[in-house]
Image: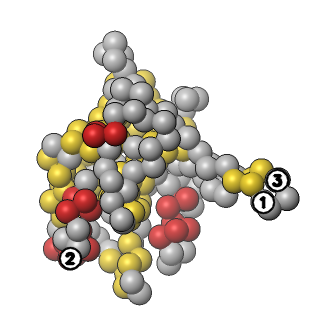
Amino acid sequence: IETLYFKTKIGTSLSIGLTNNFSFVGKRWKTIDGVEFEPNIPSLEIFTAPNKKSVNGRLVSAKPLYYKGSFIKDYYIDFKDGEAFPSERIKNIINIDDSLKYVGEIALCLNVNNKTFQSTLLDENTGSHLALGNAYINGITEIDKINKSMYHIDLVFSTNDLFCSAKTKDNKDIVLIKDGKLVYEI
């Protein structure tokens, strides 16, 4: 896969380029007794670090961002060659640090719940999202193409009508998500 494309009826239309040796991963953890578990249930999130300079289009929030005790609703961010140009509602957060102007994570999740849990940590597991700030490397060798930051802010854009397709290096289009449901096994 070379590029992911996302679209929703509320206005997200986003193209996200990936690095050459990216891989989707899910978080598996071990208890102190060595028992493995998947903490991102029910969504079974898989994620990767995109090429930070290859994000273009508009992200429109589907769920509020809970940041330092405040609820930020109805925001959008336009991206041009990776750089974020946020709406007024979220501008102060992104301006904290220049690294927050670039994407560090793109996550595919089943759209499992329309509820808002009033916690971004919980809401991010109910639908696809991206994070501004720090990337999880996960074996990516093109370190100069991924974002590094002290911050990591998840932004949920997934809706029940989310469409996601992937363009492969040999120019094929593959539909991954349609109407918020996974249609292709990765």
**Which comes before the other along the chain, label 1 or label 2?**
1
Instruction: Decide: is 182 above or below 107.
Output: above
Q: Is 75 positioned to the left or the right of 178 in the image?
A: left
| Residue visible at 15% across and 59% down in the picture | 85
Instruction: Decide: is 58 above or below 94.
Output: above
Residue 19 visible in the displayed image = yes
Residue position marked by numbered label 2 in the rendering: 92
Residue 62 visible in the displayed image = no
Residue type at the position of mark 1: Thr
Residue 31's disc number: 1
Instruction: Decide: is 13 above or below 40.
Output: above
Q: Residue 61 lies in what quarter of the image?
A: bottom left
Q: Position of residue 134 (x, y in %)?
A: 37, 56
Q: Is 112 positioned to the left or the right of 141 in the image?
A: right
Residue type at the position of mark 2: Asn
Residue 34's disc number: 3
Residue type at the position of mark 3: Gly
Residue lying furthest top in this view? Answer: 170
Q: Position of residue 170 (x, y in %)?
A: 34, 12
Q: Quadrant of the N terminus?
A: top left
Could you tell me how far apart the alpha carbons at marks 3 and 1 are, in whole angstroms?
Answer: 5 Å
Element type where label 3 sits in the image? loop
Element type where label 2 sits in the image? helix
In this rendering, the label closer to the viewer, 1 or 2: 1
Between residue 56 and residue 176, name the one nearer to us.
56
Could you tell me how far apart the alpha carbons at marks 3 and 2 are, in whole angstroms?
Answer: 42 Å
Q: Position of residue 55 (x, y in %)?
A: 24, 43
| Residue visible at 78% across and 60% down in the picture | 31
In this rendering, the label closer to the viewer, 3 or 2: 3
Residue lying furthest bottom in this view? Answer: 69
